[in-house]
Amino acid sequence: MGGTFDPIHNGHLTLGRTALIQYSLDEVWFMPNGNPPHKENIAAPIEARCKMTELAIRNIKEFRLELYEADEKTVSCSYETLEHFYETRKSDKLYFIIGADSLFMIESWVKPERIFPVCTLLAACRDEVSTPEKMNIQINYLKKKYGAEIGILKAPLMPVSSHELRERIRSGKDFSDYIPWSVAEYIKKEGLYGAQDK
């Protein structure tokens, strides 16, 4: 599961657990992206985002922090990352966990046609575009056009996005229900997103 994790929150962890259980995965890798091609104005530096991810997942043995993209100095493209692990982990079957929004935007990504041959996509129903009917239309389209393998993740909806969470922290509202305790303490200690260490 890639992402900016700015910050990582309970929705990310729930999505990881859902994938682990529904598809009988051995591990879920959380991969903070240092230089994503589609996102600007990342609020926290990559070192802090990696530390928050490490704190969030450290007590779940099937979860692992993967620093491949975080260590890259250039823009990280999903197809390059997936091809790297496809070549270096030949005995493994790779799954790529994405949100429903990404499923509908994936053709705008860099070289999306190179993603489908090396992994199975697991797309989460998580926002207003993710009705089963709409998702199945998009999945069938991508299967027909690219020969894609795609599964649906039936994950609970997260009531707040990372963007909304940053705004909540910045405005001094309580955010402890949305984020692991260890991450919340780190955010306050480091003053991330305008947090006050009270």
Image (tube, rainbow, N blue to C red):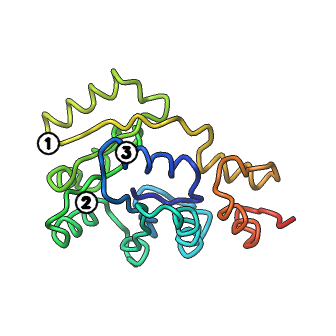
Tell me if 183 is positioned left or right of 154 in this view. Answer: right
Residue 77: name its quadrant.
bottom left
Q: Nearer the viewer, residue 71 or 88?
A: 88
Residue beneath the point at 59% across and 59% down: 7
Q: Kindly identify which residue carries mark 1.
A: 146
Check disc 1 and give the amino acid type.
Answer: Tyr
Tell me if 64 is positioned left or right of 195 in this view. Answer: left
Q: Kindly identify which residue carries mark 3.
A: 21
- The answer to the question of whether label 2 and label 3 lie on touching residues, with beta carbons closer than 8 A, is no
Q: CA distance from mark 2 to mark 3?
A: 25 Å
Q: Nearer the viewer, residue 57 or 7?
A: 57
Q: Kindly identify which residue carries mark 2.
A: 79
Q: CA distance from mark 1 to mark 3?
A: 27 Å
- The 10 Å Cα crowd at callout 3, few under 14, some 14 to 19, many 20 or more, is few
Determine the secondary structure under disc 1: helix
Check disc 2 and give the amino acid type.
Answer: Tyr
